[in-house]
Image (cartoon, rainbow, N blue to C red):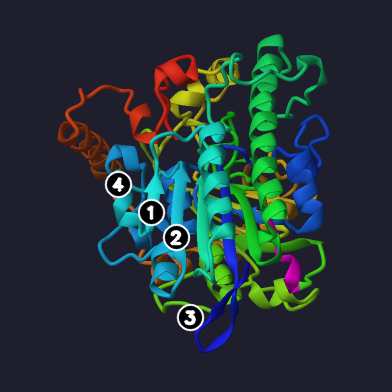
Amino acid sequence: MTSPRPDGPPRDNVLFVHWHDLGRYLGAYHHADVSSPRLDQLAAEGILFTRAHATAPLCSPSRGSLFTGRYPQSNGLLGLAHHGWEYRADVRTLPALLSESGWHTALFGMQHETSYPARLGFDEFDVSNSYCEYVVERAVAWLKGRASAPGHPEPFLLTTGFFETHRPYPAERYDPADPAGVDVPDYLPDTPDIRQDLADFYGSITVADAAVGELLDTLAETGLDRSTWVVFLTDHGPALPRAKSTLYDAGTGIALIVRPPLEANIAPRVYDDLFSGVDLTPTLLDLLGVPIPTEVQGLSHADNLRAAAGDEVRAEVYTTKTYHDSFDPIRAIRTKEYSYIENYTARPLLDLPWDIADSPPGQAVGPLVAAPRPERELYDLTADPTETRNLLTESATDSDVRAAEEIAGDLALKLDDWRHKTNDVIPSDFAGSRISERYTQTYLSIHGRPVTSRSGIAADRGIDGERSGKTNTHDE
């Protein structure tokens, strides 16, 4: 059901489905060992983004950029919401912007942008439980109610947030895949424990995939698929060493699938252009005919999505990490050919967040990643797509070193220019570490919780020990 504009053309609906910690672990992204038939079909019917990147490799900063079109240093979400980080007072979110423009906006399930969901601008929300079964039950009933409403109700934005595929993966909730059939990434040792861990992860993917199928079936049964943009995405890479909490491709590369309304007559295709998390809000606003606010820092890809061709919207994406479980400032620029990373404090090769450090992969690689991290990293993405050979330290000849330094120098200038334009100020190691500790302590004291090293508050996410099979105390 398309809602007519009072003085203009019809206005489309939007259904968001967002998951945790998935990266690109779907069959549609050439993971033949993953069972995700409903999302693979969605990709076949829509637009599959192959070079979409989160602005940050952890939950709150990434989601903040997705739903505001602004970088973390601009919108204020430099760290995790359950560590006390919040949007700045002047920030307007996508649901708030659409609500102001006549859309009815609703959220069921997961959000991790704030401890106060009323601030997000939704007209209605239920964040009491973010497991996919509950979220889909609420969303299906809501969609059927909209479809059967008399007259022409206003267009809607419905956001469905799944806790999946975040750790843990209890077997009583998620039937594991066959460990013998998983493909172990090159950056992990191939051990029985790691195979089982990946199999557990894959099990959660399959369960959540089926839940997405229920939403898609409801759109088809009600006819809402004719007027609804379906947007599926995740926040960052999987909870594995050298993925989540890093600025490598495995950390910031995200699944993004957009299926246009059937009435739009936009052909399915693969979209190979670079796409940043800050581009999502302006792109959707543009597709819906809503003006893009001047404070939005992302770029619209709407024209390229409507047409099968067009000039590339951006030549590079910028990614950032400042606060996760500790102060760990990193910035990066990524083109189709190279990735260049700057590390601003002395840290080990990988500063593993708690949920990864406690996992079988984290325990396996922990002793191997304690060496000092280089200040700069440069990777040739054509020859080395998994970013394992730093050209600034491992080039074979003097001429190779000079060539690498020249490329790094050009990318460093662009990165520095972006940092200045976005007012990206990185505190000293001493100050940043104290800020990280103080934010967490203040947040926990406000909410009447003891200050511990484990501050991922499960209750804030609609998750508790009884429903998950174990107490979830891990971070995003």
Please give the label number shown on residue 263: none
Label 4 sits on residue: 85
Give the SS element for disc 4: loop
For this rendering, which residue is in front, 255 or 431? 255
Closer to the camera: disc 2 or disc 4? 2
- Could you tell which of marks 3 and 2 lies nearer the N-terminus? 2
Kindly identify the amino acid type of the residue bearing the numbered disc 1.
Answer: Glu
Kindly identify the amino acid type of the residue bearing the numbered disc 4.
Answer: Trp
Label 3 sits on residue: 291
The x and y percentages for residue 26 are 73, 39
Closer to the camera: disc 3 or disc 2? 2
Q: How many marks?
A: 4
Please give the label number shown on residue 124: 1
- Could you tell which of marks 2 and 4 lies nearer the N-terminus? 4
For this rendering, which residue is in front, 334 or 300? 300
Closer to the camera: disc 1 or disc 3? 1
- Could you tell which of marks 1 and 3 lies nearer the N-terminus? 1
3D distance between C-alphas at marks 2 and 4: 24 Å
3D distance between C-alphas at marks 1 and 3: 23 Å
Question: From the viewer's perspective, is residue 467 above or below residue 265?
Answer: above
Question: From the viewer's perspective, is residue 330 above or below residue 456?
Answer: below
Closer to the camera: disc 4 or disc 1? 1
The x and y percentages for residue 438 are 20, 38
Kindly identify the amino acid type of the residue bearing the numbered disc 3.
Answer: Pro
Q: Report the side of 360 relative to 459 (left or right).
A: right
- Could you tell which of marks 4 and 1 lies nearer the N-terminus? 4
Give the SS element for disc 3: loop
Give the SS element for disc 1: strand
The x and y percentages for residue 161 are 51, 43
